[in-house]
Amino acid sequence: MAAVEETTNPDVSAENIAPVAKVHLTWRDRLKSICTWRVLKMVLLGQSLSLLICGTSVTSTLLEAKYKVSTPTAQSFLNYILLALVFSIPLVRRGGDDNIKVILKRRWWKYVIVALIDVEANYLVVKAYQYTTLTSIQLLDCVTIPVVLVLSWIFLHSRFKWVHYGGIAVCLLGVGSLVGADLLSGRDHVGGDDKLLGDMLCLLGAALYGVSNVAEEYVVRHFTRVEFLGMLGLFGSVICGLQLAILERHELATIQWSWQVGLLFVGFAVCLFALYTIFPTVIKLSSAVVVNLSILTADLYTLFIGLFLFHYTYHGLYFLAFILIVAGVVVYSTKPTSEAPPRNYEAMPGDSTNREEDDPASRQPLTVSQDLEQDRLVEDQERRHRDATRTLAQDPRGSPVDVMV
């Protein structure tokens, strides 16, 4: 902006400055700015993740309730094998900094830590069902959200506004409605006789999920989705295989195998593999916070299917919980999070900006709306008008003043 010298007249006063025309947005304009295709796409993708989580929950419940099979590590093992086969092989064929040898040489120990965290998060949360109540798991599982918020603020330099906290609060109200419906419908059953142990397992697993999600967002934004999933599958299969041999070899030996049990194992692995494949794409379009808010509806989809398979009891609060969670996601999405200046991606090792689908710079904020930008323009005009008024009031004799335009 340039400084323009304006010669004032003694008769000129602050009242002679024409007021800035204020742009008023109607409720329809604001609704259109919120209900964009990008927001709708994020809601749909988030609910697809919830459906996949529901698939893993239903297959796991059927294995335990009908066939007395409780092997969380064995069920996850096939998923990591599929990730390694599908995403590690392309890294072998790629050249330059995206080659698997270069990646392993530079960052192998970091992916070992992330894979260990991810494997143990899956194991701990599934194991918690054997010791504590469903209500406790639903409540403690929400610990993932504050963990993601704090880690995103520290490592991803995300800055949140009050509207974001408001959206999270609405989602948590939905979780409260879900828990209340479970209590009223009698779905809150005890899974074991050591509630404290189960609560601690769920709390630790939820916190590890938050760490894994933030690490995933960091890698997807700075490197590539294929690299993250390939390395997670490679090291996750090794860690999961060792844990399987140590902890669950006796359980595997006692399983009464049948085509139904095998089909449930495959169904669990396919749902989990699809979940891991889509998850980084949704994170790249939005953030780890949005994804974790969206998947709060997974328990509701499990309930709806359980009405037919497990004869669960329905309560009207379940529908209210679903509405609140989705509404919270939309409220959170009305404003973009502010971030630190973008990094120099070209200077980062392993970055591959020559492929458009994996270009971290192509990541767009979820909630930027051209209509809402009018409010910022109006605020800026009003601020300049107040500055000009204050300057004239301080110089009544009409000496030259510099007005920023």
Image: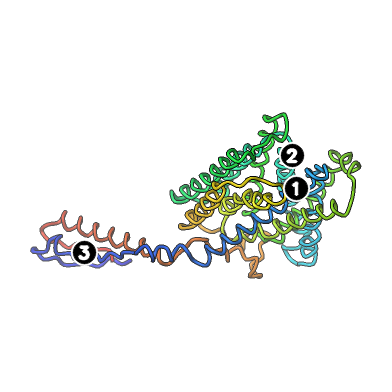
Q: Position of residue 230 (x, y in %)?
A: 75, 58
Label at residue 269: none
Q: Is residue 277 left or right of residue 257?
A: left
| Residue highlighted by disc 1 | 112
Give the answer, above or below, for where 32 lies relative to 129.
below
Q: Nearer the viewer, residue 373 or 341?
A: 373
- For the residues labelled 1 and 3, the Cα–Cα distance comes to 62 Å
Q: Quadrant of residue 395?
A: bottom left
Q: Are marks 2 and 3 in contact (CB under 8 Å)?
A: no
Q: Amino acid at mark 3?
A: Pro
Find out whether the residues at labels 1 and 3 contact each other: C-beta distance under 8 Å. no
Q: What residue is rendered at 61% in x and 47% in y?
A: 314
Q: How is the image coloured?
A: rainbow
Q: Which residue is mark 2?
A: 127
Q: Amino acid at mark 2?
A: Lys
Measure how far apart labels 2 and 1 are at the Cα level.
22 Å
Left or right, 183 with respect to 1, comes to right
Q: Secondary structure at mark 3?
A: loop
Q: Nearer the viewer, residue 396 or 20?
A: 20
Report the side of 378 relative to 230 (left or right).
left
Q: Residue at x 58, y 66 (%)?
A: 362
Residue 52, position in %: x, y? 69, 56
Q: Tell me where residue 183 appears, x and y as whole percent.
A: 59, 38
At x 40%, y 63%, the residue is 30
Q: Tell me the quadrant of the picture where the C terminus can be found.
A: bottom left
- Identify the amino acid type marked 1: Val
Instruction: Between label 2 and label 1, give the one nearer the viewer.
Output: 2
Q: Residues within 10 Å of mark 3 (few under 14, many from 20)?
A: few
**What's the distance in space between the residues labelled 2 and 3, CA to CA?**
65 Å
> In this view of the protein, which residue sits in the foreground, 152 or 297?
297
Give the residue number, with chain letter if any, for mark 3. 19
Dot 2 lies on which element? helix
